[in-house]
Amino acid sequence: MEPNLATSIGPISLDRPVMLASGILGISLDVFNRLYRSGAGAVVTKSLSTEPWEGYPNPTIFSVKGGGWINAVGLSNPGAEYFAKMIEPNKDVPIIVSLVGSIPEDFEKMIKQFENCKVTAYELNLSCPHVAKVGLEVGDDPELVKKIVRTVKNSTNVPVIAKVGLGTTHYLNTVGTAIESGIDAITAINTVRSMAIDVQTQRPILSNKFGGLSGTPIKPIALRCVYEISSKYDIPIIGCGGISDWEDAVEFFLAGASAVQLGSAIGDNWIDVFNEINTGISQYMKKKNYSKIEEMVGLAKKS
Amino acid sequence: MQRNHNHTTIVTVEKVIDETPTVRTLVFSDEVMSNVLPGQFAMVWIPGINELPMSVMISDESGKAAFTVRKHGPSSTGLFNVKVGEQIGIRGPYGNSFDLKEGKLLLVGGGTGLVPMMRLLTHVKPTDDVTVLIGAKSKDEVFFEDLANKLLANNAHKVIVSTDDGSYGEKGFVTDLVERHVEQTKFDGVYVCGPEIMMYKTVQSAHSRGTFVQASLERMMKCGVGICGSCCVGEDLVCKDGTVFDGQHLSQNKEFGKFHRNKAGILENY
Ligand SMILES: Cc1cc2nc3c(=O)[nH]c(=O)nc-3n(C[C@H](O)[C@H](O)[C@H](O)COP(=O)(O)OP(=O)(O)OC[C@H]3O[C@@H](n4cnc5c(N)ncnc54)[C@H](O)[C@@H]3O)c2cc1C
Ligand SMILES: Cc1cc2nc3c(=O)[nH]c(=O)nc-3n(C[C@H](O)[C@H](O)[C@H](O)COP(=O)(O)O)c2cc1C
Ligand code: FES
């Protein structure tokens, strides 16, 4: 029997377990359709704000020697209202809408704008490491996390995910706060604050100086986070960070993730990476005699 | 060790050539960039200012390459003002390249869109019969006419300039010339780079007659490697799927010739 790649992340059901992470290519419905046809189980939009943002000037991306990327795109996005109109015609693609804001009202306002759209889930970006007053600065403030999650949960029946990262508040505490406030699932992790300096011109390369590290160098960190979250809490988890092949994806399932997201791998292997990973997972499941993803989730915690 | 094309390489500008009052060519030594395919581009870091996508220009000295930049907003003006001896960063080459046909070729370039056309000219076969159409606003803004003639010295060829105001060459838009040429001659390949409206009309003129045509698109580019999404046109990513696309493909694209995205990703009319 062919293994079934469908998975559930709490109330969220997907036909395939590998999604596009937020901020990667996620700007137009046409591209979402293409990614879905290429094997992505869902696409997460760029993190949307109440107003359009241009983001930082270039250079906004840096390729790290030995692998990985540092980006400071600066959450450039066309704004929630524009985006909602753009995805309104969508019927087929599971779209997870990522949101950033500074106060609960920002999120409430944006969710209203998506009322006519088919949204699979909302993902709250509590973890962008390079934009002031949103992202990590919100995730680092437990009171604010509580208020935002409660407000969002009261504003919609669509499942809500919190995306966490490494800030000054321990991410496990942020996860705990989000769970207490009613969150449905957790995405772990966002990029890790970092920088790059050019030795010839003796300047930081990114226009914003600091950016978020993604790709293979953060995989062991992300995996550790997923393992720790699933050991401490009973909450569905989406693993994210440095996944580039099927073995990486399976590692995250074994650590406790029910699904995964990837971004940087696209810069290295283009969008064929989705089907390659799906095929690899499927073959692994056949070999190990699993019929569902669920049977693998958290297995590494047994020993 | 082989160079990772995503890593920024620092090069020193060795020569600056004034092409017109607003266009300059900056020459530097770099083996990799000197050998890129026609149509490929680099991300060019102007330290302290910005990083811009630029087509890679040829140089008549081996091992050297160049950028030809038009002074426009703050970033391109920053590059335009780089002096001999100053350093810039380059990564790439990125993107695909033109498919070279043989026989009767038509190359159409407007402004700095001529850059990939010059590199294409270094790849034509001696047996090719080549027509180059150069579009400019006025006499002051015409460049690369002599260079095109020089590169085609051993070919049957024509280099025709049109200016919008008629101050030099033929009067009118280069797209009117294109229409006339594709009507009169059955070309084996038509290649175009320049303002999008010009590319749109050229693609239409050629494609509607069943002539093979390719255009090199420009879009807002942040990463150049297919991650950020800023360069999408319909479902195509210009940095990764392009920059060169066939007329056949472009004629199905609902954004080409009509919309581009601003820095926030909002579609704007051309
Ligand atoms: C593949 C490619 C090849 C190019 N080759 C050349 C070339 O050979 N010579 C040349 O002079 N120009 C070239 N350009 C255009 C160049 O990258 C800049 O867009 C242009 O110089 C305007 O810069 P600016 O200083 O006016 O930017 P700004 O003043 O910052 O912005 C003005 C406008 O310029 C455009 N722009 C700015 N930054 C970018 C960016 N990162 N990517 C795309 N568009 C941008 C946008 O339309 C913007 O609204 C190329 C662009 C692309 C995409
Ligand atoms: C260019 C770029 C832009 C990103 N933008 C966002 C964003 O808008 N919102 C967000 O939550 N995460 C953003 N991220 C983080 C990714 O969603 C992801 O968490 C991170 O890249 C780790 O996964 P990866 O190693 O597979 O890339 C961005 C990452 C990159 C590389
Ligand atoms: S420039 Fe980033 S995807 Fe093309």
Image (tube, rainbow, N blue to C red):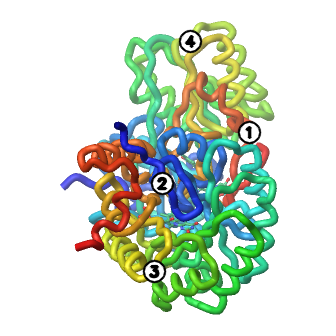
Q: Which residue is mark 4?
A: B187
Q: Residues within 10 Å of mark 1 (few under 14, many from 20)?
A: many
Residue B156, above or below A245: above
> Can marks 2 and 4 be said to lie on one chain?
no
Q: Amino acid at mark 3?
A: Tyr
Instruction: Point out residue B232 in the picture as x, y percentages from the top left corner.
Output: 60, 46
Pair 2/1: label in front = 2
Q: Amino acid at mark 4?
A: Phe
> Can marks 2 and 1 be said to lie on one chain?
no
**Judging from the image, what secondary structure is the residue with disc 1 in?**
loop
Of the numbered discs in the image, which one, if any, rests on residue A233? 3
> Can marks 3 and 1 be said to lie on one chain?
no
Query: What chain letter is assigned to the residue under label 3?
Result: A
Instruction: Point out residue A200 in the picture as x, y percentages from the top left corner.
Output: 34, 73
Pair 4/3: label in front = 3
Instruction: Specify which label sits upstream in the sequence, 2 or 3.
Output: 2
Query: What chain letter is assigned to the residue under label 4?
Result: B
Q: Residue at x 72, y 74 (%)?
A: A152
Query: What chain letter is assigned to the residue under label 1?
Result: B
Residue B209, above or below A116: above
- How far separated are the C-alphas under marks 4 and 1? 26 Å
Depth check, front residue: A209 or B89? A209
> Can marks 4 and 1 be said to lie on one chain?
yes
Residue B183 is left or right of residue B4, and the answer is right
Q: Which residue is mark 2?
A: A7
Q: Is mark 4 within 8 Å of ligand 1?
A: no
Q: Which residue is mark 1?
A: B137
Q: Quadrant of residue B259?
A: top right
